[in-house]
Amino acid sequence: MMNAPKRKVLVIDDDPAILETLELVLSQQDLEVTKADSGMAAVEAAKRGSFDIAITDFKMPGMNGLDTLAALKKIAPLLPVIVITGFATENTASEFKRLGAFGLIRKPFALDDLFAVVNKALQSPRVAT
Amino acid sequence: ALNQVKAGRISLIVSDIMMPEMDGLELVSRLKKDRDFQHIPIILLTAKVSQEELVMGLTVGADDYLPKPFGPAELRARIRAALRLREIQEQLIQASKMAAMGSLIAGLSHELNNPLAAISMNAELLLRARKIDDPKLIKSVETIRIQTERCARLVRALLDFSLQKPVKMELIVPSVLLERVMELVSPLARRKDIEIKMEMSAQKLEGIILRVCIQEIETALINLVSNALGVTSAGGSILIKAEAKKREEREGLEISVIDTGQGISADVLPYIFDPFFTTKPPGEGIGLGLSLTRKTVESHGGFISVESEEGIGTSFRLWLPAEARRNS
């Protein structure tokens, strides 16, 4: 276990306070964190390297969480993407599901809720590509 | 006249044009330029064939005119029409204020979410690090976390308030609706040792069917009942009454929630449906319950009213239109 490679997570949020905190929180969970401050930056990162999981904010200027989710799924169809949102109407929630979001977390959240979804995503069976 | 308007609350002015010193036109133009009084409807009394006076009057801002001679019935009708118009204007102003407040609240809650999420995550991180050994410091970080959660709950309530949620309308008979509400409020009533009496005659409600968003109406009723439970002391009781009632020629259902609490004082009563108005101590309510209740009832085409007497109790009456009433 000690020598197992760290699982890689791509975190996308335009707010540096959230981005840096998520980096702090997730790196303490022994994950390797890559930060992206926009949907565009996330797409670039996903093209360069592979990730085990992505966590994206919903409300962002330019590409929002939905756009980012769709773009990431095009690059890596099996990548579990978790969307963090300040609000979720039933419409947006079903739209996220339709586009293949792994899970939806409502902001603000308890760390345990975040970890529960993250761990579930990391354990989800993924077909080898 | 000007002095009287400035001295007190006047809801309508009927003024002659021909007057010594300051004539009617002068009075109208002065009042309509004053932000404090420009909303008061003014009806000008014009001389018989004075087209010029009439045009002048309306130009300087009069709301209506009445050519002399006129009968009392006509005057009364004009006054009623002007007041009706004024009332609709006020409702429109109120509605646009509410809409502006809604978008302000939605925007503000979104903006608050990020800093709140950052604060709560960092506080939790500190608590989990287990490197703080001073119990006082641990308590201090714990307080940050708990209070952040409190803010988060507030923000969620605000967001729910400002969001237009799509509603699912379903048919339900009154007895089923009330039984569901009873089921949901009974545990709280038992805990507080308060009896909830239900008064509804199956016969009188025969044929009444409601088409409502069940969840919303349930929440509205629970709001009323839990408010009633809140003001009733242990050993007391509250009464829920349901009866078929026509309103403006429409069949409907009236549900009353009657408590024997301390009542609501007359100076507070006009404000209880206003958003963010609360008499509860800080942390126990943010004053959205009754406001949401009214919003729900009105969006269903219904009405809600309240009567209260200090020391005697309060009764809320909620009326909803019925889908259909079959004559059996």
Image: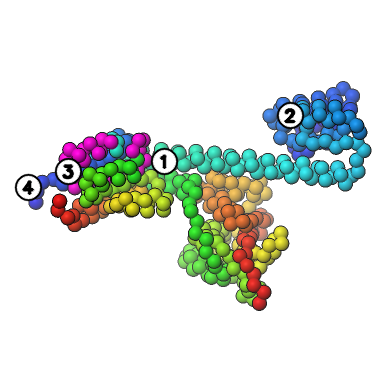
| Residue B32: mark in rendering | 2
Residue B154 seen in the current view? no
Please tell me how crowded label 4 is: few (under 14), some (14-19), or many (20+) other residues with Cα within 10 Å.
few
Please tell me how crowded label 1 is: few (under 14), some (14-19), or many (20+) other residues with Cα within 10 Å.
some
Disc with the residue nearer the chain's start (1 vs 2):
2
Q: Is residue B309 above or below residue A48?
A: below
Is disc 2 on the same chain as disc 1? yes
C-alpha distance separating marks 1 and 4: 42 Å
Residue drawn at the location 60% of the way across and 43% of the way down: B95
User: Label 2 near label 1: C-beta < 8 Å?
Assistant: no
Q: Is residue B11 magenta?
A: no
Question: Which mark lies nearer to you, 3 or 2?
Answer: 3
Q: Chain of mark 1?
A: B
Is disc 4 on the same chain as disc 1? no
Nearer the observer, B268 or A125: A125
User: Label 4 near label 2: C-beta < 8 Å?
Assistant: no
Q: Chain of mark 3?
A: A
Please tell me how crowded label 2 is: few (under 14), some (14-19), or many (20+) other residues with Cα within 10 Å.
some
Residue B185 seen in the current view? yes
